Image: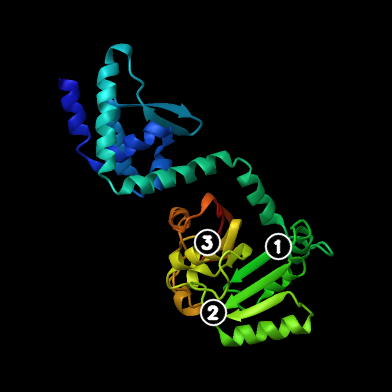
Amino acid sequence: MSSILKSFALLSDATRVRILALLRHEELSVAELQEILALGQSNISAQLSRLKTAGFVTDRRSGKNRLYQLQPPRPKDQETHDHLLALLDAATQELHEAKHDLTALKLVRRKRADTARSYFDALAGKFGRQYIPGRSWKALGETLLHFVPPLIIADLGAGEGVVSQMLAQHAKQVIAVDNSEKMVAYGSSLAEEHGFANLDYRLGDIEDPPITDGSVDVALFSQALHHASRPEFALAAAHRILKPGGRVIVLDLLRHSFEKARLLYADVWLGFSEVELHEMLERAGFQNIEIRLVDREAKSPHFQTLLAVALKS
């Protein structure tokens, strides 16, 4: 009976419930729990210490980290353990943060699995630092585009259309949408000047683009989503215009605190966290969502870029 009463006491705190629910799925470090729960290190460490003292969690050393997991039950304690899991399930269902936590856990798992990330980050950081005749990001981009099949692409929030014109060299059709009449007029004149008959500039809002439902293979937001008043509407619209099996690609800023961006660049949102972007894509109806950090600027304020790719089933 004392063990059951102890379970009730421990599960009376929402933070402990969230921690136990996560450790039921995955062995995690304090830093990873901080990232998922968005709580301070001292709070999480204190809760883990209490859970460990009570015999609900155990830990082990892994390199510089200490990883925590649920304490496996001994045969004689199996019934009490089952009661704990039943209480944990009931308590978790009452917490609106639980779904958010599981989404954040997926991202932590993906970061762990991406063991090559640090290597490629270092490699990318060296690209262009030393001058080599003929080597540039544009040349690399042009080369990689040759591996892309001829698709119908919607460039949503295209601006003057630099990306649209690169894509038009290999795509079946590119529909460039922007809400600025001057941008659309300028982009259209460039397309005509360069002979891009497959590049169609259209005036419209990315939250309701003037594109037929189910008509494009790829919907691209290249640093455009943080300019949308309602980014979730823009993603829902992208889902609408995509063919079944089509993909959305989002390049946007990781959430930052550089408030001057609102004035300097007309940014509506100061970027997005990985979890926020994942949840917006999920609500829009996308599946197979992959999000990763792909760049960090060397100069202050050190903007970081997220890449998200998702599928319309």
x then y, percent, for residue 224: 54, 70
Q: Amino acid at mark 3?
A: His
Mark 2 and mark 1 in contact (Cβ < 8 Å)? Answer: no
Image quarter hosting the N terminus: top left
Residue 20, quarter of picture: top left
Q: Extreme top residue here?
A: 76
Q: Which residue is mark 1?
A: 151
Residue visible at 77% across and 84% down in the picture: 193
For the residue labelled by badge 1, is the local secondary structure a helix, a strand or a loop? loop
Q: Which residue is mark 3?
A: 239
Residue visible at 35% across and 24% down in the picture: 71
Q: Earlier in the sequence, mark 1 or mark 3?
A: 1
Q: Amino acid at mark 2?
A: Gly
Q: Which mark is residue 204?
A: 2
Q: Is residue 23 visible?
A: yes
In this rendering, is residue 57 above or below 221? above
Nearer the observer, 278 or 299: 278
Left/right of residue 223 with respect to residue 88 in the rendered view: right
For the residue labelled by badge 3, is the local secondary structure a helix, a strand or a loop? helix
Report, in whole angstroms, how far the alpha carbon at label 1 lies from the one at label 2: 21 Å
x then y, percent, for residue 16: 27, 38
In this rendering, is residue 192 above or below 229? below
Q: Amino acid at mark 1?
A: Leu
Report, in whole angstroms, how far the alpha carbon at label 2 lies from the one at label 3: 17 Å
x then y, percent, for residue 278: 47, 54
